[in-house]
Structure formats: C-alpha cells, structure tokens
Image (cartoon, rainbow, N blue to C red):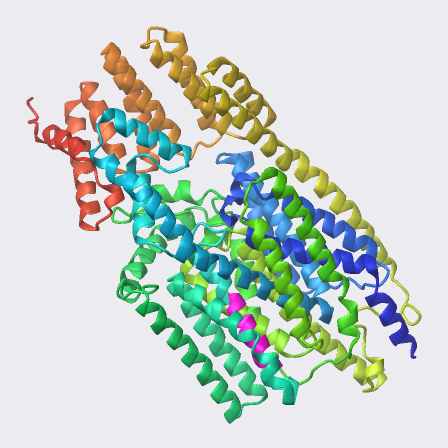
C-alpha cells in the first residue's frame, strides 16, 4: 500500500475526529427541533456554548492531520456575522433592547463557529454524505409532525377551545372572568388583538408549523429537504444499474411526505423557491447529461406533485384562497419593504441591531399596514436593517458565489471506494448517543414531550437512509448539485418570507454553502493532485483534505493557528456562559419563582425574587417591569392613597424603560397608570403626566389608533380640548384606514369609537 493510502486510512479512522464530526452534525440538526424564534430570549444559548465545545474538540483531535484553509467565502461570512455582532455591541453601548441584542450577538458567534466547522469537515466526502442524509431524515421527521398537527392536533385544539371563545362573547362578568382565567392557564391570549388573531388562526388555519412559529419558516426548511431528497433519489436511480428500482422505492414515501407537508404549509414563497431550485437542478444536471429517460423522470416528478396538489385540494388541505390571496400577500410585503427602506437609510452603516427591528419598524410602519412584524420579509432588507451595509455586503457576496458556482460544474467525480463507508461509521453512533442523552433529559424536565417520539424517529430514519444510500454519494457531483439547488431554493424563499436572522435558517443556508464549497475543493484538489502525481486513484489526496505527514510536515503557522483556536474556543465558552447563558437562566428561574409567589398572594416575597433577577442580569428589563407591576398593584389596592407607593411603581417602570428605550410599551403603561390614578384623584397633574407618557409612546408608534385614543382622552382630562379633538380626529382616521383594509385586530372597540366621535365633534369654543 502506498504511503498516502496508509496515512489516509489512519486519518479517516481517527475516533476522536469522528466523534467531533458526530457532535457537530448533532448541533446542526438539533436546530430544527427547537423554537427558532426564541433565540432572542436566550433559550438556545446552550447550543452556542456547545459550538464552542465542538470547536475545541475538533481542533484538539484534528490539528495533526488538517491544513486549515480559508477562502473568499470565509471572508463573506465574516462580513455577514461581523456586521451583526458589531451592531449588537453598539446597541449594548448606547440604546436599545440590550439583553436581546447580546443574546443574538452570541448566536451570530455560534453561527460563525458552525460555518467554520462545517466548511472544514465538508472537505471530507464522508461528512458531506452524513449531512445530506441527516437533513433529509430531519426534514422527513418534521414533515411527519406537521401532518399530525394538521390532521389531529390543531382540529383537537379547535374543538377544545372553540366553544370557550363562543361562550366568552356572551358570558356575564363573572363567567367571563372564569373563562379568561382558564385560557390564561393554557397561555392563550384573553383579550385585545392577540385574542382575535389567536381565535382566527385556530378556527380558520390548519397550516403545520413544526417547531416554528410560522408555517412559512417550516415551508423553507421542507423545500430544502425535498430538493435534497429528490436529487439523491435520482442519483441513486441513475447509478445503481439493474437494481435501480429496488433502491428507488424507499425514496418515494419520503418525497411524498415532504411534498405533502410542504403543500399544506400554504407557503407560496416556499413553493416558488422549490420550483426554482428544481429548475436549477434540472439545468445543472442537463449540462452533464440530458436524455429522454431524465426528461421522463422530471415530467413524472412534476406530475406527482401536481396530483398531490389536486388530491389535497379535494380533501380540504388546499383551497382556492391560497392563489386568490397571493396579490394581497404581495401587497402586504410591499408595505413592509416600503416602510423598511427609510429605516435602512436612517441606520445605513450599522443597522438597528439584531432583535431590534420590530421596535424601530413601528416608527416607520405605514398607516395601512397591520402586522407589527419582526423582520421585513426579505433577506437582503433584513440583513441591511439589522446588521448594516457591511453585513449586507457579506450576504450579497455569498448569494452571488452560490449562483456562480453553477458555472463551474463539470463531469469530474472523485472516487475513493469503500473508504467513505468505513470513515463515517461512528457518526450515527454519536448522533444516537446525543439523542439518547437529550431523550433522558426530557424525561425528567418534560419541556417538550414531542421530542420523546420525534428524536428516536429521526435517528431511525438516519440509520435506514445510510443503509440504502450509495457509499460514494459524498464524492459524486450530485453532492454539489443538491446543495446548490437547495441553497438557491432557500434564497428565493427568503426573498419573500424573511427569517435569515433565525440561527436555524442562517445556519442551514451556510451549511448548504459549506457542502457546495467542500465538493468543489475536493474536485479541484483531485485535479491538482493528478497533474502532479499521476492519475491513479491511490495518489489522490485524502478525503479529509490532509496531506501525508511523511511528505508534508506540519507548518508552524498551522500549529500556531490550532493553538489560537483552542484559546479562542475556551475563551468564548467561558464568555458566553458568564455574559449570556447563566444570567438568562438565573433570571428565568427567579422570575418563575416570583410568578408562583404572586399566584399564591405573597407579593413581598415575589418582589424579592424579582430583585434577585434584576441583580443577576443588569441588562434585562423584565425583572424591573415585574417589580413595577407589583408596586402598582399595591398602590391600586390602596386606592392610590400612598403617593410614595405609586411613585415607586413609576420609578421601577422607568428603570425597565431605560433598558429598552426604543420600546413604546413602558411609556404606554405609565400613561395607563397615571390615568387610573386621575380617575380616583381627579387631579389635573395626574392627567398631564399621562399625556407626557402617552406622547413619548406615540412618537415611537405614530400609527397606533388605540394609543392615539388614549392620548386624546388624557389630553381632554388635562383640559387641552383643542389638542384632544385633533388627536381624536387622527385616531378616527386611522381606525377608518384599518377598517378599509379589514385589519380586524386593529379595530377600535365600539365604546371607544363612540367616545372619540363625541370628542371630535366638540366645537372649539366649547
């Protein structure tokens, strides 16, 4: 055996490297079993900490066999992540929602580490194969959960809570209070626009969500997994030969399941993305070899998708509104984009900061718009608004690089035989062990019992797919074609849906880029090797990208870089625990303890717990807000006889507002408190304080009709009738706009509208 081959087998079979690979794959796939939208609250910081551990593991076990490589894509990702991180640090140093900004800054650090590790490991054909199989298995599992949600879980919820909504509308005061208490115990909104939206979604919508908050997000993930599954299935069918049909049939239920759930999401952007990705895949494969058999296969796939759509429409899974309301959906997005553009212009260089979009957007929101969106539903506007022009430059460069990679496709395939199968044998064991540990934790915590079923199913699918997928999949050109086609589909989807700021979606896009980049690197390396050493398979470079130690000793630069990575990973791990994970967990525990004491009526003891939470995390506004609510509750119970008690509540709420000065809610709450006190004391000073608070809130949210109504009533109580009438007229105009656009969650209640009409009708002399 030649020296290269001997070293190759030793390097590939390294247990430490395989364990690190398995852990890194687990961290990637686990994102799709968590609530992606909760990253700002710090619920997924533990994954960032584990990314630091993964970086440490990989560096320690691989520095002897890896030549670290950096390229243009690394620089682009550095711009994308670095822009967001710098913007978050500016928010922390100046004004904004500091805790959320810091949490998301760490998420971008974790995403950067994930990119680095995925790119380095994707130089190994075996790891590329494991990623593709893992994503398909995960997507299929989540799709199965989505079908369960659509056909079982959501109808059961509607049957359970639908009658409560009907009773609430006609119940007397005492019965309504009892119903609201029952709903609140299930974390269901009890009044206002939130209740209207929840009821509408529960009764009228059955779109599967998976572990996400929106069906659109699930649709984007399913689009990626569907394209990967189709690409791999067709590749298997083409290469297996006489055994093709027997190897193809297991893919049929997987593709049907993914496509079925994707259709049920009613995500038009995901559908368009899927069609674009499949078109890109067809054109790319046509450059290699296009024949009548392939044309029949493509036509058959499209026919199956069309039949699935027709069947779902017959059983109620799809309706005509999905198509007829497309222009309205586009119109809403144009409203979002129109309002976002001046925000970007005002914060061109650094953006508003990660997690700050919604609070800033309310200032720019058009009068005819309804939703208080968390992102502009466009990946480029999202990145520009949150991370600034530097982050946008990075994203544009990544997108262009992915598209241009289609121009470099060729027929060359690197082949290394059965070593690929042997090299990755430990990865499924590591994944299984990781899932077993998570399963055991869930048995004790019970945080999400759905995972008790879904995680074992995902592992079982991964094992099954590994048995039917060709061992040479990671080396074949199909790896790059699949990843590029899926990445194009995701980019097109994100153009109209947004969500790239979610770590799960951002890492999915970068993971696909890493696979495509790793595939290109492997082929180019093979070409260079063949030119210099000959065309024999035995003289190809190792599948992990390393060179034989007997012919190329380790450079001092690489050793120094490995040492730097070790120090950096340990430092980042300690920093994320001390500055983010630990404070967030302590605050959550203390707030939960305080809430339980409040339910039992021990208000003083609850305030102690909230005070501990405020001390544990100086950046968080929530402990101060809870303390303020408690102080106000005491003052209200005393009928505001104690001036000190009420002023203490005001002081605490202002402390909360100082930690998030862009948010209008704290000032609005202060206005409500001053007006409540005015109704008891009838003192003009109280009404004037309410006016000041409402005005500060209105400046930040100028199209909120309810806020304008509150301000008008406060102005009237303060004796400024002309200003009150002018604001009342503006509130009525905004309410008319909301009614014209049928934003039912924004309608002013009839009693409030009547009061505004009377206030606006007053003469100037009166």
Image quadrant of residue 378?
bottom left
**Position of residue 76 measured from the top left corner of the image (x, y, whole percent):** 61, 60
Does residue 585 belong to the magenta stretch?
A: no
Front in this rendered view, residue 288 or 164: 164
- Above or below 273: residue 635: above
Front in this rendered view, residue 695 or 307: 307
In which quadrant is the N terminus drawn?
bottom right
x 88%, y 75%: residue = 4
Along the horizontal axis of the image, is 389 left or right of 714?
Answer: right
x 50%, y 25%: residue = 623
Does residue 226 belong to the magenta stretch?
A: yes
x 47%, y 88%: residue = 296
- Above or below 536: residue 252: above
Count of picture labels? 0
Do we see residue 378 in this rendering?
Answer: no
Along the horizontal axis of the image, is 675 left or right of 568?
Answer: left
In which quadrant is the C terminus drawn?
top left
Front in this rendered view, residue 702 or 478: 478
User: Which residues, given as a range, are shown in magenta?
Assistant: 224-237
* Helix, strand or loop for the magenta stretch, by majority: helix
Image quadrant of residue 464?
bottom right
**Position of residue 450 measured from the top left corner of the image (x, y, whole percent):** 53, 49
């Amino acid at each position: 055996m030649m020296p290269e081959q001997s070293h190759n087998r030793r390097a590939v079979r390294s247990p430490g490297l395989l364990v690190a690979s398995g852990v890194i794959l687990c961290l990637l796939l686990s994102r799709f079993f968590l609530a992606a939208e909760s990253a700002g609250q710090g619920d997924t910081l533990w994954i960032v900490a584990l990314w630091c551990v993964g970086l440490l593991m990989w560096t320690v076990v691989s520095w002897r066999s890896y030549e670290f490589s950096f390229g243009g894509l690394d620089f682009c990702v550095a711009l994308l992540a670095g822009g967001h991180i710098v913007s978050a640090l500016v928010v922390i140093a100046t004004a904004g929602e500091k805790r959320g900004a810091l949490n998301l800054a760490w998420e971008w650090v974790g995403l950067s580490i994930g990119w680095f590790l995925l790119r380095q490991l994707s130089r190994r054909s075996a790891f590329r194969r494991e990623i593709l199989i893992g994503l398909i298995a995960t997507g299929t599992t989540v799709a199965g959960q989505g079908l369960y949600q659509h056909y079982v879980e959501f109808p059961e919820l509607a049957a359970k809570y639908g009658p409560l909504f009907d009773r609430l509308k006609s119940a007397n005061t005492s019965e309504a209070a009892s119903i609201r208490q029952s709903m609140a115990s299930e974390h269901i909104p009890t009044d206002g626009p939130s209740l209207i939206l929840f009821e509408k979604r529960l009764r009228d919508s059955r779109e599967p969500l998976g572990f996400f908050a929106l069906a659109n997000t699930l649709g984007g993930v399913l689009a990626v997994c569907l394209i990967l599954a189709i690409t791999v299935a067709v590749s298997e069918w083409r290469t297996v030969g006489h055994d093709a049909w027997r190897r193809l049939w297991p893919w049929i239920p997987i593709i049907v399941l993914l496509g079925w759930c994707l259709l049920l999401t009613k995500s038009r952007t995901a559908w368009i993305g899927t069609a674009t990705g499949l078109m890109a895949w067809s054109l790319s494969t046509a450059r290699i070899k296009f024949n009548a058999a392939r044309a029949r296969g493509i036509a058959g796939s499209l026919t199956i998708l069309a039949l699935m759509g027709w069947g779902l429409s017959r059983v109620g899974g799809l309706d005509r509104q999905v198509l007829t309301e497309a222009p309205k959906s586009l119109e809403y997005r144009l409203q979002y984009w129109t309002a976002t553009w001046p925000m970007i212009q005002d914060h061109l260089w650094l953006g508003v900061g990660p997690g700050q979009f919604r609070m800033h957007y309310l200032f720019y929101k058009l009068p005819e718009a309804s939703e208080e969106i968390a992102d502009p539903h466009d990946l480029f506007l999202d990145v520009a608004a949150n991370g600034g022009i530097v982050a946008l430059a990075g994203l544009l460069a990544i997108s262009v690089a992915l598209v241009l990679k289609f121009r470099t496709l060729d027929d060359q395939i690197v082949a290394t035989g059965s070593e690929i199968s042997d090299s990755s044998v430990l990865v499924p064991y590591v994944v299984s062990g990781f899932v077993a540990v998570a399963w055991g934790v869930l048995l004790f915590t019970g945080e999400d019992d759905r995972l008790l079923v879904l995680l074992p199913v995902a592992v079982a699918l991964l094992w099954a797919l590994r048995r039917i997928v060709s061992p040479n999949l990671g080396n074949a050109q199909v790896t790059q074609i699949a990843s590029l086609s899926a990445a194009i589909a995701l980019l097109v989807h994100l153009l109209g849906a947004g969500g790239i700021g979610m770590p799960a979606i951002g890492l999915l896009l970068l993971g696909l880029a890493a696979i495509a980049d790793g595939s290109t690197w492997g082929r180019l390396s093979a070409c260079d090797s063949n030119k210099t050493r000959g065309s024999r398979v035995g003289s190809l470079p190792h599948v992990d990208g390393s060179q034989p130690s007997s012919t190329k000793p380790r450079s001092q630069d690489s050793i120094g870089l490995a040492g730097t990575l070790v120090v950096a990973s340990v430092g980042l791990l300690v920093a994320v625990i001390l500055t983010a994970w630990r404070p967030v967990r302590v605050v959550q525990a203390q707030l939960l303890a305080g809430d339980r004491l409040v339910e039992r009526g021990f208000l003083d003891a609850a305030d102690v717990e909230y005070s501990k939470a405020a001390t544990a995390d100086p950046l968080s506004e929530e402990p101060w807000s809870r303390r303020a609510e408690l102080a106000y509750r005491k003052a209200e119970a005393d009928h505001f006889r104690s001036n000190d008690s009420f002023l203490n509540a005001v002081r605490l709420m202002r402390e909360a507002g100082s930690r998030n000065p862009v948010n209008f809610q704290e000032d609005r709450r202060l206005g409500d408190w001053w007006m409540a006190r005015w109704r008891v004391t009838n003192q003009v000073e109280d009404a004037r304080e309410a006016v000041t608070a409402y005005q500060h809130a209105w400046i930040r949210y100028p199209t909120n009709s309810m806020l304008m109504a509150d301000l008008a009533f406060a102005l009237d109580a303060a004796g400024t009738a002309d200003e009150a009438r002018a604001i009342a007229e503006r509130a009525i105009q905004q309410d008319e706009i909301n009614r014209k656009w049928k934003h039912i969650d924004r309608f002013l209640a009839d009693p409030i509208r009547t009061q505004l009409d009377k206030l606006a009708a007053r003469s100037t002399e009166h």
